[in-house]
Image (cartoon, helix red, strand yellow):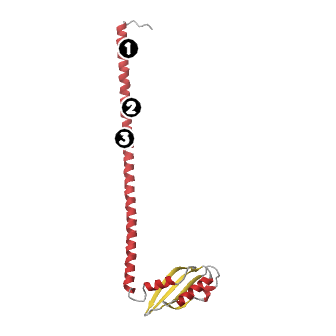
Amino acid sequence: MVNVLPRSEQKRLRRRYYLNLGTLFFMALILVFAVGSVLLLPSYFASRAQADSYERYRDAFSGAIGLKEKEKVDAELASLAEELRLTKEYGASAFSAEIFEGLESVPSSNVTITAMSFSRSGETTRFSLSGVAKNRAALLSFAEALKAHPSFANVSLPVSQLVAEVNPPFSIRGDIHTP
């Protein structure tokens, strides 16, 4: 194919062609950018909704932790109220800290006390100690030390609990002596 147009017309036509081609390229680029933006909008809203959901979950979780901490505080307050009630009820009687001091003064390095209970009927306060000793000799020496202590009276250790040689479980009962 032969071009019969004059040179100036060819240049002008080529310049117009490239200008139209560049305009078309930029229009296509703008169209691609606009379509991409429109297509990204749902993703933006979905991620924003998910971020809000995570924030609500975090706030609810923080609130739950706060409720658990509040429950711990309430439980501690209830425990302290019970201790206060017991202190008021037994504070001036024979059932006081002296009993626990008496238990602490009895040598018990080879004996583990797992439970302690006290009961009062009239003027008599009875105690019961349960636990595990390392061996039978340690259990016997603990029971003898309790019997010898002036704060305790009528201390009894059933013979049936001396059957095991190693780690014998025990339950010692007795009265608390009021001076």
Residue 92 position within the rendered picture, expressed as x and y whole percent measured from the top left? 38, 88
On the image, numbered disc 3 is attached to which residue?
A: 41
Q: Is residue 124 above or below residue 8?
A: below
In which quadrant of the rendered view does residue 147 lie? bottom right
Q: Secondary structure at mark 2?
A: helix
Q: Residue at x 40, y 86 (%)?
A: 90
Q: Mark 2 is on which residue type?
A: Val
Q: Mark 3 is on which residue type?
A: Leu
As drawn, the label of residue 164 is none
Q: Residue at x 37, y 43 (%)?
A: 44
In which quadrant of the rendered view does residue 124 lie? bottom left
In this rendered view, identify the residue nearer to me: 123 or 58. Answer: 123
Q: Residues within 10 Å of mark 2 (few under 14, many from 20)?
A: few
Residue 102 position within the rendered picture, expressed as x and y whole percent measured from the top left? 48, 85
Residue 168 position within the rendered picture, expressed as x and y whole percent measured from the top left? 61, 81
Q: Is residue 54 above or below residue 160?
A: above
Cα gap from disc 1 to disc 2, whole angstroms: 26 Å
| Quarter placement of the C terminus | bottom left
Q: Residues within 10 Å of mark 3 (few under 14, many from 20)?
A: few
As drawn, the label of residue 14 is 1
Q: Is residue 4 above or below residue 106?
A: above
**Left of 25 or right of it: where is 107?**
right
On the image, numbered disc 2 is attached to which residue?
A: 32
